[in-house]
Image (cartoon, rainbow, N blue to C red):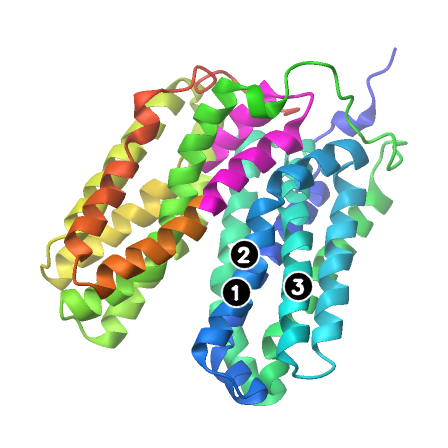
């Protein structure tokens, strides 16, 4: 029997997966990036603008696991198109009038669509058969899109005003939808959307998979703590270290921006040197803990640059290896496995960001940062046996 041609590596499928994940990443930061225009257009203060982000972040975090289960049942393309359609429809509604209630509701729908998009994008990267390198590229684009939004949305405020954040979010989702449709249309295999669905074989629920939870712990700290620190490190540099505002902001941005490089690099290393995955992950966690601890005591700009540089590179290196290990371990439910891991990471963001902010506000930044440093090492207490196993390109 001839092997289906769907097994061939597909750059188009990988590109579609990256753009689908990027649409979710863009929306996570777009409201904050467009704060000035939104503040003027809606006639509200920054607290309300912050709630625009929260309105998306809560459903985005809570729906990760159900979204992954949906992707496993429907297939990544159809589920991805649904998620993108929700985002586009919500943004188009928000564009009609600057009404706070409408914007909150729209952002909640965007959060639900974004949750589907992340799992769908990761599964498309898996289906591209590019292995951990493809997953690393997916992760780099997903987080890089959020950084791009921080740059682009304020620039377009001059032309679009308060609509800048919503219009660019819709545009990112439309671009991703076009890529998914194109990848489906140009596939060389006679595969339909329904045929794409994986078989859900019996087996234990992902919620009862102890090894998967151990992988999720690595993903939770590398993504979750990275985002938490990226939210506050510039404030620490400015208020506690006494660095100039511009320097503090530039250094703070490196925590996430360097992940654009480190996530694909980690995927490359995992693909070329699978035996080094476990020491790579252990080294990344230890390095991240040490860099976070270094932030706890004020020093000079050189130390600050070294600390955020290590954080940005080390926090991104495990992403692809951990994702690939989870998808391989739960080949029956690969998207649900990704959803479980991303749910834990985003819940850590929802809890950790305000708690660290409170510590900084109450002049307890040293204690708060040392607690964060200790959290980096928690996954080392119960390492996963799934790390370090060779990942077949099909997964």
Q: Which mark is residue 53?
A: 1
Residue occupying image coordinates x 57% and y 62% = 55
Give the mark, 3 or 2, whose residue is nearer the N terminus: 2
Mark 2: which secondary structure? helix
Q: Is residue 59 left or right of residue 39?
A: right
Image: 348 above or below 90: above
Q: Do the CB atoms of the residues marked 1 and 2 lie less than 8 Å apart? A: yes
In which image quadrant can residue 270 be found? top left
Relative height, residue 282 to residue 307 (above, below): above
Image location of residue 94, percent across then percent down: 70, 75
How many neighbours does mark 1 have within 10 angstroms: few (below 14), some (14-19), or many (20 or more)? many
Crowding near pointer 3: few (<14 within 10 Å), some, many (20+)?
many
Q: Quarter holding the N terminus?
A: top right
Q: Earlier in the sequence, mark 3 or mark 1?
A: 1
Numbered mark located on residue 57 in the image: 2
Dominant secondary structure (helix, strand or loop) of the stretch shown in magenta: helix
Which residues are the magenta region? 319-347
160 displayed left or right of 184: left
Q: Neighbour class for label 2 at 10 Å: few (<14), some, many (≥20)?
A: many
Q: Which residue is mark 3?
A: 172
Compared to residue 113, the image places residue 2 above or below, namely above
* Residue lying at 65% horizontally and 75% vertically, measured from the top left: 101
Question: Against 364, is 268 above or below?
Answer: above
């Amino acid at each position: 029997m001839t092997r289906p041609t769907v097994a061939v590596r597909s750059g188009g499928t990988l590109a579609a997966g990256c753009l689908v994940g990027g649409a979710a990443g863009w929306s996570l930061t777009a409201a904050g990036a467009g704060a000035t225009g939104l503040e003027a257009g809606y006639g509200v203060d920054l607290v309300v603008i912050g709630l625009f982000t929260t309105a998306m972040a809560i459903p985005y975090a809570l729906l990760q696991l159900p979204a992954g289960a949906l992707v496993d049942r429907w297939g990544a393309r159809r589920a991805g198109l649904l998620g993108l359609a929700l985002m586009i429809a919500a943004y188009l509604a928000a564009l009609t009038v600057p009404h706070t209630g409408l914007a909150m509701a729209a952002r909640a729908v965007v959060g639900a669509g974004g949750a589907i998009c992340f799992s769908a994008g990761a599964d498309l990267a898996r289906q591209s058969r590019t292995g951990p390198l493809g997953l690393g590229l997916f992760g780099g684009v997903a987080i890089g899109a959020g950084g791009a939004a921080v740059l682009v949305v304020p620039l377009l405020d001059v032309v679009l005003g308060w609509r800048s954040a919503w219009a660019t979010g819709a545009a990112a989702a439309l671009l991703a939808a076009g890529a998914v449709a194109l990848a489906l249309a140009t596939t060389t295999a006679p595969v339909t959307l329904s045929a794409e669905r994986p078989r859900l074989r019996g087996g234990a629920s992902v919620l009862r998979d102890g090894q998967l939870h151990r992988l999720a712990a690595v993903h939770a700290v590398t993504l979750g703590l990275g985002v938490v620190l990226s939210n506050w490190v510039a404030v620490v540099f400015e208020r506690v270290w006494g660095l100039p505002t511009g320097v503090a902001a530039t250094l703070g941005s490196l925590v996430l921006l360097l992940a654009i490089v480190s996530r694909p690099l980690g995927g490359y290393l995992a693909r070329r040197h699978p035996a080094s995955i476990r020491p790579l992950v252990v080294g990344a966690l230890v390095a991240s803990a040490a860099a976070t601890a270094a932030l706890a005591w004020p020093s000079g700009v050189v130390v600050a640059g070294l600390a955020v540089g290590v954080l940005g590179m080390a926090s991104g290196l495990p992403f692809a290896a951990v994702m690939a290990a989870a998808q391989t371990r739960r080949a029956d439910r690969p998207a649900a496995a990704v959803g479980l891991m991303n749910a834990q990471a985003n819940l850590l963001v929802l809890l950790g960001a305000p708690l660290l902010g409170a510590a900084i506000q109450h002049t307890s930044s040293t204690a708060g940062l040392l607690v964060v440093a200790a959290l980096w090492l928690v996954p080392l207490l119960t390492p996963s046996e799934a790390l370090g196993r060779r990942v077949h390109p099909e997964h």
